[in-house]
Image (tube, rainbow, N blue to C red):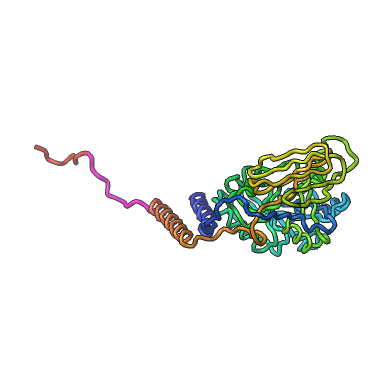
Amino acid sequence: MLLKRAAFAALLLMALPYIRGPLYDFPPEAAFSGTQLLNPYETVSHPWQRANLHAHGRPWGGLTNGRQSDADIVRTYESFGYSVAGVSNYQHIAAAHGVPTIPIYEHGYNVVKRHQLAIGARSVTWFDFPLWQTLSNQQYVIDRVAATADLVALAHPYSRDAYALEDLRQLTGYQLIEVVNGPFLFEDSWDAALSAGRIVWGIGDDDTHDLTDGRRTAVAWTMINARSSNTADVVEALRAGRAYAVARTNESASAIETTLTSVTVRDGTLHVTCEGDPSTFVFVGQNGEIRKTVKGARSASYPFSHDDAYIRTVIRSPRTTMFLNPVLRHEGAAPQQLAAQVNMAGTWLFRGGLVLVCLALGLLYRERRRPALKRSPRHVLAPAGRKTA
């Protein structure tokens, strides 16, 4: 009996977040369009900051699965030449507890691993949907995280099918997505969002839980064109798209690490140059379609056609692969971020229906618990002293 009551109480508790979550109307999917081209690297003038924004220590006395202290993470990455060593523990801002890192944490404790990085976090958002998540549930979580952070990045978007491609074509409210997470690449997820007209910039992170794991430490990073490694400068550069994600591949030996030199747009043609070994330049467009490939070069160009909504460049060098942010079409002033809107009428109808279902389940449980009425025993055989014909 106690187990049944506990299970019923747990069911009601699980239902509470879903009652609270609103329904959303999402902006329609539409490719970028216009006569002008937005180049996020147009104003590049600052030094490049090498950053890792996703690493785990041992907060709360080691309850999470990081194998090193927060301070060890910072020291190790600084020894590797990183100027931004992010410590992004689950639901815990290490910078608020004296760790010399930017304020950041990883949000999410649901079973499907839909997690977000809250960059420039002012406080921790604890709300989440622990079990399944509808598209509106996903949007509500993103909006809640964004309310107390400067930027929101979707972490490992396709791990355990966390964010389906069709969902990424509709969701809004986040500015960044992990294109590189340790040894894993998520270009399809990025292209799904971009092809639907969502302005999303790419980042790369280790997502390390163990600094001694060579597959997860210093294998992915983000180069950020920021004045300094201070939080405000890093956030401003990431918001503007002055960054690119890097994955270390070591496909062949090289003593030189290839770096980006410039990205310019002149007369409708995109020009990209790098410094280091000759590399392969791949220009990727709408729906992830490869539009052009240039091999064995330190520079390459691509003329925009009328059908190109955006073009992003991938540079494959002997040691690394660089994923540049896209140059995209727009009209008039700088393009605005799309935003899903709460459908108030639908939300209250849904909440009312969910409350009625919970009440019905409660009444049904109460009825099943009600004791049966006692009845007098019924004689099956006639009494022995009864006279019969």
- Which corner quadrant holds the C terminus? top left
Q: Nearer the viewer, residue 76 or 135?
A: 135
Q: Nearer the viewer, residue 1 or 259?
A: 259
Q: Residue furthest right?
A: 255
Q: Residue at x 76, y 59 (%)?
A: 237
Q: Residue at x 83, y 37 (%)?
A: 296
Q: Residue furthest front?
A: 267
254 lies above or below 263: above
Q: Position of residue 127 (x, y in %)?
A: 61, 58
Magenta span of residues: 369-380
Q: Is residue 42 visible?
A: yes
Q: Is residue 307 magenta?
A: no
Tell me which corner region of the image, top left, top right, bottom left or bottom right, holds residue 125: bottom right
Q: Residue at x 82, y 35 (%)?
A: 251
Q: Is residue 202 visible?
A: no
Main SS class of the magenta portion in the image: loop
Tell me which corner region of the image, top left, top right, bottom left or bottom right, holds residue 74: bottom right
**175 relative to 135 in the view: left or right:** right
